[in-house]
């Protein structure tokens, strides 16, 4: 790398010495040996002083910080210093570029959503990013240069790391956080070094569990009414000649009820699917709130068929900005739930309130109520506090899930207050931006 500067140094040392010897030889030829020796002695002293000076400059410069300008000198020594300075400058530039590239690489690794750990050939941690610290609950200040298997002691991980067969990733549940599931992949590189990549797949696992539960619940919900319909039809086919007209109508009415239940379930599934998958919202319109609430109250009275006392409270009017179809669906679901879960003779109140702070629609009843332990899960698909009672009253288990998604889509909030034996109050609150007051 510095072959040419060394050549200049050799010339800078040897050439003056050769010139001095040549001059001494000429002096000996013209003036005799004494003159030659005197000239040689003086020349050697001067040459030694010059050499010492330049060597001192070189050593002093070499001890200075990188980037210090090269010393000034004449002749070949000046060329030596210039060549060495240029070479060091180029090497510094290359080093800076490599350092910058390494810094960018480390910044990218630090920002990765996956965990990254570099292991030496003896499984000791050489480097890790913050996500790996979080996944494996490590500490960069304490765990560097520590063998990873001695910190993460889960048997399946230790076996996977030691088996040296990394074609398939390892999926494992964290021992310290049971709600976290990690997918771990090991990649060998640079001889015996390895890189451990980790990804939190807890959400994906929850979604997969939800998908399985959804398929199971839909199958179960459709199987029951379908079985009933098939049973009634078989009864009619087998005993049509023996059954009276009233019995035939009775069985057909029962089959029609179950068919309606399946149709309602499918319609609500389609509605919920459109809401959950982020389908484009219907064109927003100005919905006259009081008229909508009155319509829902009338539907509630029809569904109740006189078994409950239904009252309506209107405090302010105004317009609610959104999809009338979706808002009617959400309001009606709350009202129909109140009818289903309030014993005969109970009271159901539907209300609307609007002011400068926003608006609120609520449905309150004095029915059976809900244990607080169930409230956080009420908006889950097919979640029921009492499965038997829900099926008896015709519930699909999707109503509150639809209410939640419609409310969220309209920037609102669903609140639930309930107590077993004392009734429930469901309220939808919408921000001022969704309200146009008269």
Image (spheres, grey):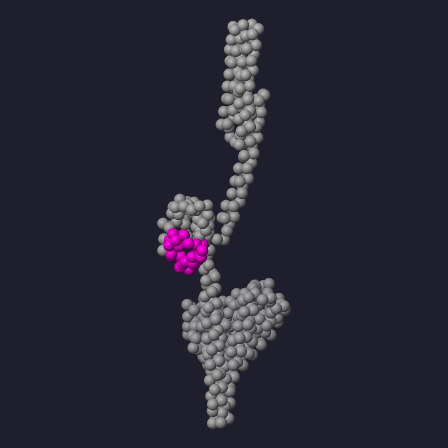
- Of residue 425 and residue 89, the one placed in the foreground of this image is 89
Visible residue check, residue 180:
no
Visible residue check, residue 171:
yes
Q: Residue furthest front?
A: 29
- Of residue 13 and residue 283, the one placed in the foreground of this image is 13
Q: Residue at x 48, y 78 (%)?
A: 394
Q: Residue at x 61, y 70 (%)?
A: 287
Q: How many marks?
A: 0
Q: Which quarter shows the C terminus?
A: bottom right
* Residue 86 lies in the magenta stretch: no
Where in the figure is residue 224, as x and y percent of width and height?
46, 79
* Residue 179 lies in the magenta stretch: yes
- Of residue 126 and residue 46, the one placed in the foreground of this image is 46
Where in the figure is residue 150, as x and y percent of width and height?
36, 49
Where in the figure is residue 436, as x and y percent of width and height?
62, 66
Q: Residue at x 46, y 62 (%)?
A: 205
Q: Residue at x 51, y 89 (%)?
A: 249
User: What span is in magenta?
Assistant: 156-185
Where in the figure is residue 338, as x and y percent of width and height?
49, 75
- Kindly indicate the quadrant of the structure image that contains residue 419: bottom left
Q: Is residue 188 above or below residue 277?
A: above
């Amino acid at each position: 790398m510095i072959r040419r500067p060394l050549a200049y140094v050799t010339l800078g040392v040897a050439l003056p010495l050769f010139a001095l010897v040549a001059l001494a030889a000429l002096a000996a030829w013209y003036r005799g040996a004494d003159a030659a020796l005197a000239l040689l002695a003086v020349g050697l002293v001067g040459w030694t002083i010059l050499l010492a000076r330049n060597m001192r400059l070189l050593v002093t410069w070499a001890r200075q910080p990188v980037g210090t300008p090269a010393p000034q000198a004449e002749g070949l020594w000046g060329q030596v210093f210039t060549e060495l300075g240029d070479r060091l400058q180029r090497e510094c530039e290359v080093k800076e570029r490599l350092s910058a590239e390494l810094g960018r690489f480390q910044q990218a690794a630090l920002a990765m959503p996956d965990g990254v750990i570099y292991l030496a050939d003896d499984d000791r941690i050489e480097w890790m990013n913050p996500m790996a610290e979080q996944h494996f609950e490590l500490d960069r200040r304490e765990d560097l240069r520590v063998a990873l298997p001695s910190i993460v002691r889960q048997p399946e991980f230790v076996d996977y790391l030691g088996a040296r067969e990394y074609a398939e990733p390892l999926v494992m549940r964290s021992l310290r956080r049971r709600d976290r599931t990690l997918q771990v992949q090991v990649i060998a590189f640079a001889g015996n070094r390895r890189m451990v990549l980790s990804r939190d797949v807890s959400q994906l696992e929850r979604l997969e569990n939800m998908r399985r539960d959804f398929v199971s619940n839909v199958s179960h919900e459709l199987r029951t009414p379908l079985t009933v319909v098939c049973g009634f039809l078989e009864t009619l086919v087998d005993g049509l000649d023996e059954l009276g007209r009233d019995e035939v109508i009775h069985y057909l009415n029962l089959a029609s009820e179950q068919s309606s239940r399946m149709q309602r379930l499918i319609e609500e599934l389609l509605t919920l699917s459109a809401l959950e998958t982020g389908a484009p919202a219907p064109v927003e319109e100005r919905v006259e709130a009081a008229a909508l609430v009155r319509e829902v109250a009338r539907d509630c009275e029809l569904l109740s068929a006189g078994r409950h006392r239904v009252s309506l409270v209107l405090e302010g009017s105004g317009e609610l900005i959104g999809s009338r179809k979706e808002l009617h669906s959400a309001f009606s679901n709350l009202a129909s739930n109140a009818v289903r879960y309030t014993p005969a003779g109970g009271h159901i109140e539907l209300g609307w309130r609007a002011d400068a702070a926003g608006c609120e629609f609520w449905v309150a009843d004095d029915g059976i109520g809900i244990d607080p332990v169930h409230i956080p899960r009420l908006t889950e698909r097919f979640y029921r506090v009492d499965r038997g009672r829900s099926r008896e009253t015709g519930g699909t288990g999707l109503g509150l899930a639809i209410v939640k998604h419609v409310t969220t889509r309209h920037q609102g909030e669903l609140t639930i207050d309930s107590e077993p034996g004392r009734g429930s109050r469901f309220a939808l609150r919408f921000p001022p931006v969704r309200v146009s007051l008269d």
